[in-house]
Image: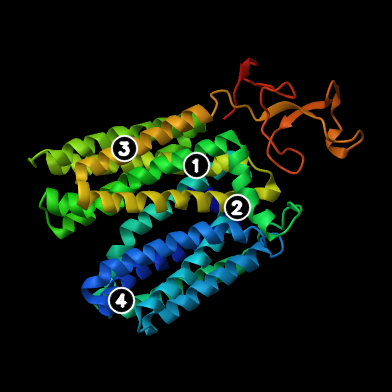
Amino acid sequence: MPSVLRNGTYRRLFTAQVVALVGTGLATVALSLLAHDLAGDAAPAVLGTALAIKMIAYVTVAPLVTAVVDRVPRRTLMVATDLTRAGVAVALPLVSQVWHVYVLVFLLQAASAAFTPSFQATIPLVLPDEHDYTRALSMSRLAYDLESLCSPVLAAALLTVVPYDRLFAGTTAGFLASAALVTATALPGPAPAGRSGGVYAKAAFGTRLFRATPRLRALLALDLAVAAAGAVVFVDTVAAVRDHLDRTAGAVSVALGAYGAGSVLAALALPRLLRRSTDRAVMLWAASALPLVLAAVAVLTATAPGPWSWPALLAAWAAIGAACSAVLTPGGRVIRRSTAEADLPAAFAARFSLSHGCWLLTYPLAGWLAPWAGLPLTAAVLGAVALAATAAAAVIWPVRDPYRLEHVHPDLPPGHPHLADARAAGSGWLHGHHYVIDQHHHRWPGRDGRRRKTPGRSRAGKLRSPR
């Protein structure tokens, strides 16, 4: 996996991602302490509202970025968002009212919602080789997981020598370092002009792309399965550990660390696994494990605690982390193979927005059900959501899913450049190629007689479905 770091452009971008993540981790801890200072016993409500604002910013801002991304150089956009985040981090220690926190959190997360899809859309252009790109996806997953494990430890160490508001200085430094690294990096030039139309049309295209492409609809269903299981971990761990198992506050961190450890191990194993199996197989098998583990969690939390309960909870959290990582990490490969280069920013922004929309549904469900109905029913309900989402993905994503599809264009005139290799058919012009939704292809080929699938070939020259 470190072999991709020999690419200087990717190395600087990855380093920028890591230092920005560390800064974000420090801000998370500092924001919790700031909320306690401002609101006292109402701090959980303040933080809950701030998290909701974060998700709203992610869901609403990311698609809008696609309306201007083809007009602004990638480097300019990414540096501008880093500088915006640094400015917000500078302002946070100065606030005196809770509503100030809400406004600044929205600005911070709106900038992140612009930066992250732009970053994700740049990596496949920097690393065109599929194996290198897969390693980069795994490294990105590792960066997120290690940040969640290490940032609280780093924050705790810093708090022994500085007051909490100084942690925001670390956040500012992280974003400024990220901006400096991006500034020093020569990024690929802009893709060929994307789609025409107004701001709304460009912002809506990513969502239409997901709706029209079967494997992308399946990807969204799998994101919902991950959000269902992840919400149990991130929202209900404290209740499971402190109330049901009656363990110390430090045990909450250990349980969350088990989730992170499972995710790290899966990310390390995925590059080799994806060379031997398809994205569909890996992601569906991993997602299928989530409802089973949540069913086990329901039984665990419905049973009186015993000496086996704590190890069982750690094992369950590690299994959820591994399964979630195995679903999330290959998602970039699926988007890359389902999207024209000019539309990558729109596709990644749509995935960013829609996947966080899933979390916006499951976070409140996990939070409201647990105190009202108890942990066993909460785990069972979210397990049912994960099961339904996984089953839907398995149905939506065809087992045979070739990228080259033979189809008919009934609407393009003779001599059109796109029809260079086409031949006349009864209702138009017939040809086949790597099929994606774009300006010439508005619907996925179906079984209506106008569009027909052409299978790929196996290693021995036999027919097969590509990955």
Distance in Å between CA atoms under marks 2 and 4: 34 Å
Distance in Å between CA atoms under marks 1 and 3: 17 Å
Q: Which residue is mark 4?
A: 34
Q: Nearer the viewer, mark 2 or mark 4?
A: 4
Q: Residue at left 37%, top 58%?
A: 147
Q: Which residue is mark 1?
A: 220
Q: Quadrant of the image for the C terminus?
A: top right
Q: Is residue 93 left or right of residue 123?
A: left
Amino acid type assigned to the residue bearing label 1 in the image? Leu
Q: Nearer the viewer, mark 2 or mark 1?
A: 1
Q: Which residue is mark 2?
A: 121
SS state under label 1: helix
Residue 383 image label: 3
What crowding class fits label 4: few (fewer than 14 Cα within 10 Å), some (14-19), or many (20 or more)? many
Coordinates of residue 55 in the picture (x, y in percent): 44, 59
Q: Are marks 2 and 1 in contact (CB under 8 Å)?
A: no
Distance in Å between CA atoms under marks 3 and 2: 32 Å
